[in-house]
């Protein structure tokens, strides 16, 4: 059995620059990955099976379009492995929450299948599968902090973030990525300044989807307020299309205290660090 972590993804910055003919958007983003998230286990089997466990398993009940299944089918179509697969997704990240849960799960599935069958991760066909599954999947496949252009899959690795304590908070609301992007007003508010320290660069930037998501889920305002008021918070922002927000802190004790306050509101929290 091969087990792969599917770490939570956060967007330290997300600038939407334009609409593309292929239906995606031209973006500039600063991806970062946490040390914790979901996990995917894959083992050879006589027939294909897929199961979901974990605290958010019920949110995926009956989801025949789950990205894990799509990733496994795409891998099989390209590489024709000699065996079927038993796959288990242990779901600890909230669904439709702006932290790349589905994309991270798909990427972890691909990594596990590649390990099981000896497929090099640099194999072009392997990378092409990731691109076909969604704009965030290539970044999740690499799993390292990176600047993303184009759809978000033109990647340049970034250093200087590993080990920073971070708290993720979701108010219990699912947000449709498609709905948020459709509501973007089409105004290009300028490029992401990528120079210097990545936290400083993120602080000079923005998330162009935050205003839209906050209108859909007003509770995001309260989450941002609680995190902004927390002692030691260096950067507070909503991730992706929401509704999960994050704060990067100076130390783990500050993370724990901010999490205590957030949990007292009944919100989901993940105390972790950047990978």
Image (tube, rainbow, N blue to C red):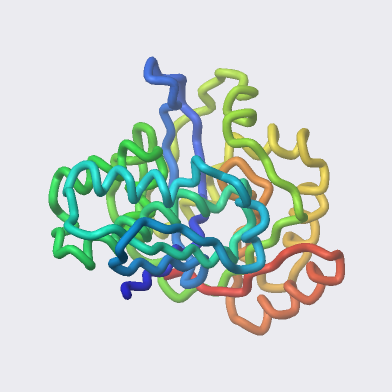
Residue furthest front as drawn: 46
State which quadrant residue 158 falls in.
Answer: bottom left
Q: Is residue 120 above or below residue 39?
A: above
Q: Position of residue 9 (x, y in %)?
A: 49, 56
Q: Position of residue 145 (x, y in %)?
A: 37, 58
Count of numbered tags = 0
Write the residue at 49% across / 46% down: 66
State which quadrant residue 271 falls in.
Answer: bottom right
Q: Is residue 165 above or below residue 198?
A: below
Between 38 and 157, the one nearer to me in the picture: 38
| Quarter that holds the C terminus | bottom left
Left or right, 271 with reference to 144: right
Left or right, 251 with reference to 131: right
Q: Position of residue 110 (x, y in %)?
A: 31, 56
> Is residue 78 shown to the viewer in this render?
yes
Write the residue at 78% across / 41% down: 217
Left or right, 90 with reference to 77: right
Write the residue at 19% across / 43% down: 78
Residue furthest right as drawn: 265
Q: Is residue 69 above or below residue 249?
A: above
> Is residue 144 shown to the viewer in this render?
no
Residue furthest bottom as drawn: 253
Write the residue at 37% across / 60% down: 108
Q: Position of residue 206 (x, y in %)?
A: 57, 42
| Quarter that holds the N terminus | bottom left
Left or right, 172 with reference to 88: right
């Amino acid at each position: 059995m091969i087990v792969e972590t599917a770490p939570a993804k956060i967007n330290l910055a997300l600038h939407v620059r334009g609409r593309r003919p292929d239906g995606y958007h031209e973006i500039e983003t600063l991806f970062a990955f946490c040390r914790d998230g979901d996990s995917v286990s894959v083992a050879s089997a006589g027939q294909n099976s897929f199961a979901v466990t974990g605290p958010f398993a019920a949110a995926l009940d009956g989801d025949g379009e789950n990205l894990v299944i799509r990733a496994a089918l795409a891998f099989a179509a390209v590489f024709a492995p000699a065996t079927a697969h038993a796959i288990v997704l242990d779901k600890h990240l909230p669904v439709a929450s702006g932290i790349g849960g589905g994309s991270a799960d798909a990427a972890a599935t691909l990594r596990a299948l590649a390990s099981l069958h000896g497929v090099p991760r640099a194999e072009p066909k392997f990378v092409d599968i990731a691109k076909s599954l969604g704009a965030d999947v290539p970044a999740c496949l690499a799993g390292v902090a990176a600047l993303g252009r184009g759809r978000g899959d033109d990647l340049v690795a970034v250093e200087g973030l590993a080990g920073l304590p971070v708290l993720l908070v979701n108010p219990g609301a699912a947000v449709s990525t498609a709905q948020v992007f459709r509501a973007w007003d089409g105004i290009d508010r300028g490029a992401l300044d990528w120079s210097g320290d990545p936290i400083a660069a993120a602080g000079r930037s923005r998330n162009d989807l935050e205003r839209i998501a906050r209108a859909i889920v007003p509770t995001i305002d309260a989450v941002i307020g609680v995190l902004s008021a927390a002692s030691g918070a260096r950067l507070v922002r909503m991730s992706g299309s929401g509704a999960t927000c994050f704060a990067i802190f100076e130390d783990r004790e500050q993370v724990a205290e901010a999490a205590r306050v957030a949990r007292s509101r009944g919100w989901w929290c993940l105390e972790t660090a950047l990978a």
